[in-house]
Amino acid sequence: MAISADFTKVFSVGAVFRAEDSNTHRHLSSYSRMLKHGTDFYTLDKYPLAVRPFYTMPDPNDPKSSNSCDMFMRGEEILSGAQRIHDPDLLTERAKLHGIDITKIKAYIDAFRFGAYPHAG
């Protein structure tokens, strides 16, 4: 939200959490099996939208995909990122599709009604 407050450079450090369920430190890497192709580093891009959190931006060219990616090194996920939805109406629609009670995230959605830049995290 700091970028919406007209700060020109925004960098944040803080605790992270996984929006999706995961029970292992090798989350998702077990599904990729890319190391058999002789590479230690790879990127998985355009995850299916159905498995991403509600606030992930859909791919404008493919409604079943998302603007998100994960990077792996030697079988370990080292980085993940996604474009966030900055439009309050689309954010509301996606939250409802995920069965989220809109009244519980009203302040979050309302923050975007004042205008927000496209952003990622």
Image (spheres, rainbow, N blue to C red):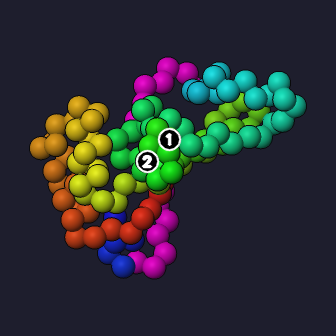
Q: Residue furthest left?
A: 103
Look at the image and say whether residue 11 sits in the magenta stretch.
yes
x, y percent for residue 70: 60, 41
Q: Residue at x 69, y 38 (%)?
A: 72
Query: Which region of the structure is painted magenta?
Result: 7-25
Tell me if residue 120 comes above or below residue 101 in the rendering.
below
x, y percent for residue 78: 64, 41
In the image, 44: left or right of 40?
left
Which residue is under mark 1? 65
Q: Secondary structure at mark 1?
A: strand
In the image, 111: left or right of 3?
left
Q: Secondary structure at mark 2?
A: strand
In the image, 14: left or right of 73?
left
Q: Residue at x 59, y 27 (%)?
A: 28
User: Gap between marks 2 and 1, in whole Å?
Assistant: 6 Å
102, 97: nearer the viewer: 97
Residue type at mark 1 is: Ser
Q: Earlier in the sequence, mark 2 or mark 1?
A: 2
Please tell me the numbered disc located at residue 58.
2
- Label the magenta part by its dominant secondary structure: loop
Tell me if residue 113 comes above or below residue 22 in the rendering.
below
x, y percent for residue 92: 23, 48
